[in-house]
Image (cartoon, rainbow, N blue to C red):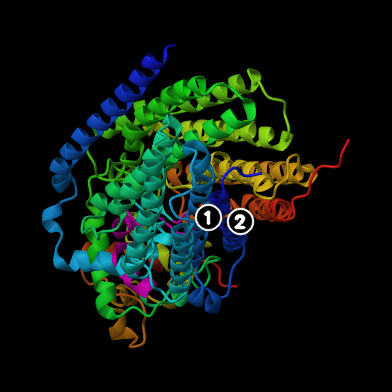
Amino acid sequence: MITYKSQRAAYPYFVIALLLFALQVLMGIWLAMNYSFTLPQSLVDIFPFSTARAFHTNLLVLWMLLGFMGGTYFMVPEESKSELFSTKLAYIQLILLVGTGVAALIGFLFGWTQGRPLLEIPFALDLLVVAGALIFLFNVAMTLIKARNWTMIQGTLLGGLTMLALLYLFGIPFYKNLSVDWYYWWWVIHLWVEGAWELVTGAIIAWILMQITGVPRATVEKWLYVEIGLFLFTGIAGTGHHYYWIGAPRYWLWIGGIFSALEPVPIIFMVYDTFRHVRERQEKIVNPLVWILVVGCSIYHMVGAGVWGFIHTLPQINYYTHGSQVTVSHGHLAFFGAYALLNFTIFYYAFPRLKGIDKFNNTLGKWGFWVTSISMFFLGLAFGVAGVIQSYLERVLGLGFMTAQAQMQLWFQIAIWSGVIFFVGVVIIIYDLLSLKPAKAE
Amino acid sequence: MSSKTAKLIFYLGTLSSAILFLILTWDTHRQIETLTNADKLSAEVVSGKKVFQKYNCNDCHTILGFGGYYAPDLTKVYRRRGGEYIRQVLQQPEVVLAASFRKMPQQNLSAEEVEKLVAFFEWVDDIDNLNWPPQDSKPRSSSSLRRLVGGSNVSPGAALFKENNCFDCHQIGGVGGTAGPALDTIGNKSTDEQIRAYISDPLVVNPYAQMPSFKSLPEADLRAISEFLSHQQGEAQ
């Protein structure tokens, strides 16, 4: 049951996000196979690893952002107590962004790229992305302005989304100096995932928690202030942990080391906060799966981003693990724990309501959650072990890159199988969400 | 905690971190010119970076540790492999990496693009990035080379053979690349002097040779390497 008709605009965002997610995972399995098997030169010449990786990472960014945007369109009417400014704009924006995404993927196949990891899409398409982001911000801001019903949660959400859009601009120009290039590349990547996206997460989770627990707004908002304050305090200067080995001044070892050692603090706080709201709930649990996802998201966020990030963030360790499979392990666990599970939470909270179901049958959904969570953990472990082997053989002993890679093959094969099982979990979730049914009456 | 304190934590936390970060960004800009030798960023180096981006090299290779983890890091590739190997592998990856279980695409680079890339890697190699990565770090590799020469009965020729990256293309005792022939029994076929002449300028001996010329090596080094090779007379099977 939705309160405002325009919340329906979120639905197509969610559906497309889910399909892109499936495609991202398939591409991931293909990448893992590239690691394990020798592919014929003729295939490598037309569809190299680099192109597949560009697919994998750009699909990641696109589906997650579509999930956030859909989540925003779902949440803002209820928070501001008014219809969206324009659902038509929301659909135009969706078509524009998805069209740009598809054009970018096709372009990659033909070598149309800016050639910078994660920011591969060419300048012309960047402009379309900016246009899409502007439409989105305009639409949300106009809704809030017209509604005149300001809340702190909306402020955090809009702040996060604006920050997200502004930071993207630093990724657009061509930088002559490679070191300066990477310096600002991290303004997009790091300040997104450890800044802007955390604000979006904080706001959406706070809002869902408030809805399902019935904890008073004043309490939720108070703790949200503390949480995002800590996130930004550690996250902004914590960008320094990417500046250790790029040709930047030596003091970044100190700044990056100290601030990023503190980065788990806000995450632990978030877990604590979630548990407290769950304990102090005023409402009955209607859909256990949504609760499992909220709690699971905060715990996995802590493991993937907090613990795994902390493990190799100190310069003394990072000197050996930087740019190895350890990074791959951290990247997968952190993105899944923090942002994929956040999107699942949004989907499982919004889908039943969009379909007019009060209490849904969550058997399949639970399977989906556990299958994806556990297989992703094995994937992270496999990359992690491979990363430790690589750090020791290549970086400590000084053996050749390929000599070290040869010793990591077993773990790449485990990664393939984990990926296949993960894909099964994703298919379960997509099927379940698209065909959601009411729970059988007890 | 009152909500006032909560807000204070938010504003203080965010602002202090942001201000610190912006000040350090300003200072980094001041220093990075020197640390990266920005004065040597010639037009050729910059267009080399453009070539690097055009072919999306960075989604397989890391550079400064960032990018794809599929292929070797390129930060110090100029030091590790030398310009000649870089040229060879860029022009004919299918030949140089024929025996490798991981392949590099043949992207049909023009000779000009290859030279620009080499200039780019040469510039990147000089960035003062606190000796990362460890396996290519100057203080570390020179000490390991000293250990190799001084601490064992390895001949200076063997050390020079390794130092000049001959192992990239040639195998001895099952170690090394396969772009060129294995050299375990070279001493049975060629004399010291023949080997020296070949290394110095392969094209004089064999007009179809793919091996680069090593004319630029000091004469003493050439002699040491060819002497070492002439002793490779492993039992021919």
Is residue B149 visible in the rendered structure shown here? no
Residue B71 inside the magenta-drawn segment: yes
Residue B212 placed where, x, y %?
31, 75
The extreme left residue here reads B39
Chain part drawn in magenta:
B68-90
Q: Name the kind of residue labelled 2 in the image.
A: Leu
* Residue B71 vertical placement versus A140 (above, below): below
Mark 1 crowdedness (10 Å alpha carbons): few <14, some 14-19, many ≥20: many
Residue A194 placed where, x, y %?
41, 38
Residue B64 placed where, x, y %?
33, 50
Quarter of the image with the N terminus of chain B in it: top left
Report the residue marked by disc 2: A18
Q: Nearer the viewer, residue A12 or B153?
A: A12
Q: Are marks 2 and 1 in contact (CB under 8 Å)?
A: yes
Helix, strand or loop at disc 2? helix
* Residue A282 vertical placement versus A392 (above, below): above
Mark 2 vs mark 1: same chain? yes
The extreme right residue here reads A442
Report the residue marked by disc 1: A63
Quarter of the image with the C terminus of chain B in it: bottom right
The Cα–Cα distance between marks 2 and 1, rounded to whole angstroms, is: 7 Å
Q: Residue at x 49, y 47 (%)?
A: A83
Q: Nearer the viewer, residue A386 or A99?
A: A99
Q: Residue at x 42, y 63 (%)?
A: B167
Question: Which chain does the residue under circle 2 lie in?
Answer: A
Is residue A282 visible in the rendered structure shown here? yes
Question: Which chain does the residue under circle 1 lie in?
Answer: A
Mark 2 crowdedness (10 Å alpha carbons): few <14, some 14-19, many ≥20: many
